[in-house]
Image (cartoon, coloured by chain):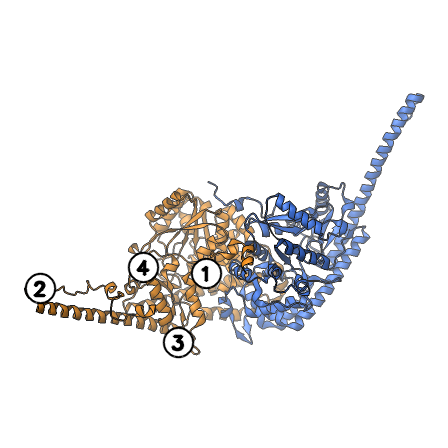
Chain colours: A blue, B orange
Amino acid sequence: MKMLAKKAMCNSHGQDSSYFLGWQEYEKNPYDETRNPNGIIQMGLAENQLSFDLLESWLKANPDAASFKRDGDSIFRELALFQDYHGLPAFKNALVDFMSEIRGNKVTFNPNNLVLTAGATSANETLMFCLAEPGDAFLLPTPYYPGFDRDLKWRTGVEIVPIHCTSSNGFEITESALEEAYKQAHKLDLRVKGVLVTNPSNPLGTTLTLKELNLLVDFIQAKRIHLISDEIYSGTVFDSPGFISIMEVLKNRNLTNTEVWERIHIVYSLSKDLGLPGFRVGAIYSNDDMVVSAATKMSSFGLVSSQTQYLLSAMLSDKEFTQNYISENQKRLKQRHDMMVSGLLEAGISCLKSNASLFCWVDMRHLLSSNTFEAEMELWKDIVYNVGLNISPGSSCHCTEPGWFRVCFANMSEETLNLAIQRIKIFAEATIKTINENKSQEQSNKNSKRKSFTKWVFRLSFGRETSER
Amino acid sequence: MAFGKNLLSKMATNDGHGENSPYFDGWKAYDSDPFHSIENPQGVIQMGLAENQLCFDLIQEWILKNPKASICSPEGVNDFKDVAIFQDYHGLPEFREAIAKFMAKVRGNIVEFDPDRVVMSGGATGAHETMAFCLANPGDAFLVPTPYYPGFDRDLRWRTGVKLLPVVCESSNNFKITREALEAACQKAEESNINVKGLLITNPSNPLGTILDRDTLQGLVNFINEKNIHLICDEIYAATVFTKPMYVSIAEILEEDKSCNRDLIHLVYSLSKDMGFPGFRIGIIYSYNDKVVSCARKMSSFGLVSTQTQQLIANMLADETFIEKFISESRRRLAARHGVFTRGLMQVRVGNLQSNAGLFFWMDLRRLLKESTVEAEMELWRVIINEVKLNVSPGSSFHCSEPGWFRVCYANMDDETMRIALRRIKKFVLQADEREAAAKKHMWHKNLQLSLSFRRWDETIMKTPRIVTPHMMSPHMIMSPHSPLPSPLVRARN
């Protein structure tokens, strides 16, 4: 008899993917300015380390929040005992206000429709358990966050069917791609329960356009399926065209409280916007009371620590702080982004034009030895081992075109980023040179083949010997 | 919305969450009328929540003395960034080490735990679900001795599709787990074509408050080795053992029994009961099986412990002097509470299963039941909630095979509330007994009158009247629906 569950023995956890292998290599040889200056620089981790000083100064100025105190009195006992899966009311109120603020206060959220979960990882899995049976499918635009393979599929038995997006139109979601994916699911005998999009996108770093959002609403209306919008990067939008939340679209189309309204669900987290992935603060926002009810009960398997809820309720209730944080954080992200984009451009490498997130979607197609995923893997290994940068290959994000890489810029100091850019420049120049040399070698091989043929013909016709080049 | 219902999964709309069980009804009654010594002195006293609130004064003192333990306080803020960013599912090394040491300490340092086998989970709730995902496929089953914690029905079954099969334990031998009961459960599973993957035990037991003796534990280890099934030991109440006999952890048995297949043994732990921190969601899986450690660790992504909390706990548990004092003082206070309650109840002839652990005791109210049925137990329970104003948990919600037992929690209130609760129980029982005694007396007189009048009518053919002796006048007779006497249970029905 098999001793462990099939789930324990398979690799649907996705950890054999290159996304995680790169991490492993980094762990073995991590860059450190003083202790290991030749080590691998971590550029595969979408973390926001740019605004900790703002958080730290708030903490110093507000000692009660972290010391289990309220107005000077200890509330340790109250917090230690608080395990109500409805969550700390003060925290949920502060969180929905924060979400609203990020959306320019164009939409408001009801705290009773918010379910707290242990990170967005848990939120996404929980939504699958609530919306789909094992064997059902969700459609996801490619490229997408590699973690979804684990979060959406592993323990739930749900399948992912890709909506293929290509560089021909900046990887935007098209109607034909949606229909194609839907058909594909049917070919595979899978019942489609919904579409899941990440907005702003990971790994593209772009916000969904109004056109795409409307397309999605039309699509799920027609097919009568769900739409999950993972808006975990919503606070990282640093440039125009700006962030349009799915809720805003529904509101503007007068779809509030209609049938389709109840099939829209948002996933959020403080891991990216506030840079607190360790605190495991995730949330599901749903307009469907039954989903809220079921998800709330399921959150028992991964509640947010009351200690953390209390701290963050105090922090996010400080409107002066949140307003300043949001705008300052976005400024710093833009500056880093611009630094990365211009640096890469100098190396002859372009990025997909983006206005959000903690990374760029970098176009290295011209550095491939051939337009294949094998070549992409070769290039990736070269970059990890020889250049010393852990970046994420597009194939790990299920991109349909080889040659794209996700490169993070917000999880290191400016100096380190500059160093990374220098390394890429050197590498790119060398690679292009090699490629050109190979090309001309190939060309000259072709030429010399032609020449020798000509010579041969000449010899034959004229009987004279000429030397080979 | 009817249409909406079809769009959701079966899981989202079925009863698998288990919240329609009476275990939670009592909570609802409490929520709508909660006792408060000043604001609502007639309210329902919560005795259905197994929480350890006896030692917060010690913890609070420690927190005040150790501001650096919180990375978010001004004193600890230098560590803030590193900890806030850390999302490695291995957990902070100092956290794992502290947990391993604490677990050893609680077990008298007779055994050691390897920090590398410590895996985090979203409370013990998350730990149990993860164990089910790792060890069993949908349709497989775990055996669980009854009575057991109602939450298992949700934790092990809801999203996993795994079944729970009861191993029936009875009061006749103090609810011990017997070989016969285990074999019977296995047999039943085989007949139903259900694949048993493991046995889940809680030691110390919830709701019994008892610990497993060494022989029984060894017997269980032998059993699972023979059947080649897993053994999951929930030791969440390990530090609540407040008096002899001494606690024996499965870890100890494993040390002694080298023939046991270690790959079958897994521990579930948490700080929710021993330390009183349910809000912090500190669940632990400790497995002796490398593959399970690896799989559970990956699954822990769905329920990691907040690093803010990991840091606090790592610091707190590392303070060995404090922890030793805490463990012994907690035991002392639990013992005292347990003693006050059980002695108080003995005064009104209410017994309980003899126990030496847990945050509750297993109260025997069988003699107050109208009849030995679940319905009668439910009736009695409704009276206790609605009239006596105590939320205690009925045995049926723990899948107990015998009606009349109730779990009563005593560690989640202050001394004054405890006294009031005790007074209320005693009053209720005394009144019930008085009524019973009065009813008996009335019946005795009535029977006497009847027999006398009978004799008057027919002296020759008169038979000897049946003497009404106490042993004939069982409570069941008195409390019958035909009884002209008002009983609290009849009132309850109205």
Q: CA distance from mark 1 to mark 2?
A: 60 Å
- The picture places residue A464, in percent across and down from the top left corner, at 93, 22
Residue in view at x 41 percent, y 62 percent: B23
Furthest residue in direction left, as rendered: B460
Q: CA distance from mark 2 to mark 4?
A: 38 Å
Say what secondary structure mark 1 lies in: loop
Neighbours of disc 3 within 10 Å: few (<14), some (14-19), many (20+): some
Q: CA distance from mark 3 to mark 4?
A: 30 Å
- Reading the image, the residue beneath label 3 is B42
**Is residue B239 visible to the viewer in this orientation of the structure?**
yes
Q: In the image, is A107 to the left or to the right of B330?
A: right
Mark 3 vs mark 4: give the one in front.
4
The answer to whether dots 1 and 2 both sit on one chain is yes
Q: Is residue B284 above or below residue B261?
A: below
Q: Nearer the viewer, residue A315 or A352?
A: A352
Residue B373, which numbered label?
4
Residue in view at x 57 percent, y 61 percent: A288
Which residue type carries mark 1? Glu
Which residue type carries mark 2? Met
Which of the chains bears the disc numbered 2?
B
**Is residue B53 visible to the viewer in this orientation of the structure?**
no
Say what secondary structure mark 3 lies in: loop
- Reading the image, the residue beneath label 1 is B19
- Reading the image, the residue beneath label 2 is B462
Q: Which of marks 4 and 3 precedes in the sequence?
A: 3
Mark 2 vs mark 3: give the one in front.
2
Which residue type carries mark 4? Thr
Q: In the image, is A411 to the left or to the right of B355?
A: right
Q: Is residue B44 above or below residue B103?
A: below
- The picture places residue A241, in percent across and down from the top left corner, at 75, 62
Say what secondary structure mark 4 lies in: loop
